[in-house]
Image (cartoon, rainbow, N blue to C red):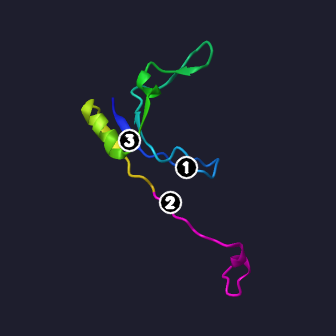
Amino acid sequence: MHARIYLPAKTAMQSGRRNTRRWILEFEPEMAKRMDPLMGWTGSADQNGQVRLSFASREEAEEYAARHHIPFQAAAPHERRLVLKAYADNFKFDRVV
């Protein structure tokens, strides 16, 4: 029962950054998913794959994992790099194409 602690990335479908400020503790799958031969559905007997806990800070998530004796791996968040552009820059005299 190994856990992963991370800060989720912004979704590519929207420009907003909702749900990217809370840290997530998610369990790694212990067994592979298998296909049901009759219906073709995929399933697993691993119930921890359904658990996803959110915390306000990384320290809270690490304390929770330590308190419940859950081995974890914490990932550092990726910082956004903003490239500020203006429409007028397309028509600058010294523009490099």
Q: Amino acid at mark 1?
A: Lys
Q: Is residue 75 left or right of residue 83?
A: left
Q: Amino acid at mark 2?
A: Arg
- Which residue in the protein does label 2 denote? 80
For residue 45, which quarter of the picture? top left
Q: Which mark is residue 10?
A: 1
Q: Is residue 94 left or right of residue 4?
A: right
Residue 28 at x, y = what percent? 40, 33
Is 79 in front, or is 39? 79
Q: Main secondary structure of the magenta part?
A: loop
Q: Is residue 8 magenta?
A: no
Asked if 97 appears above or below 26 in the picture, the reply is: below
- Which residue in the protein does label 3 denote? 5
Q: Earlier in the sequence, mark 3 or mark 2?
A: 3
User: Residues in magenta?
Assistant: 79-97
Q: Which mark is residue 69?
A: none
Quarter holding the C terminus?
A: bottom right
Asked if 57 appears above or below 67 in the picture, the reply is: below
Residue 21 at x, y = what percent? 47, 47
Residue 42 at x, y = what percent? 56, 22
Does residue 84 appear in this view? yes
How far apart are the alpha carbons under marks 2 and 1? 10 Å
Q: Earlier in the sequence, mark 2 or mark 1?
A: 1
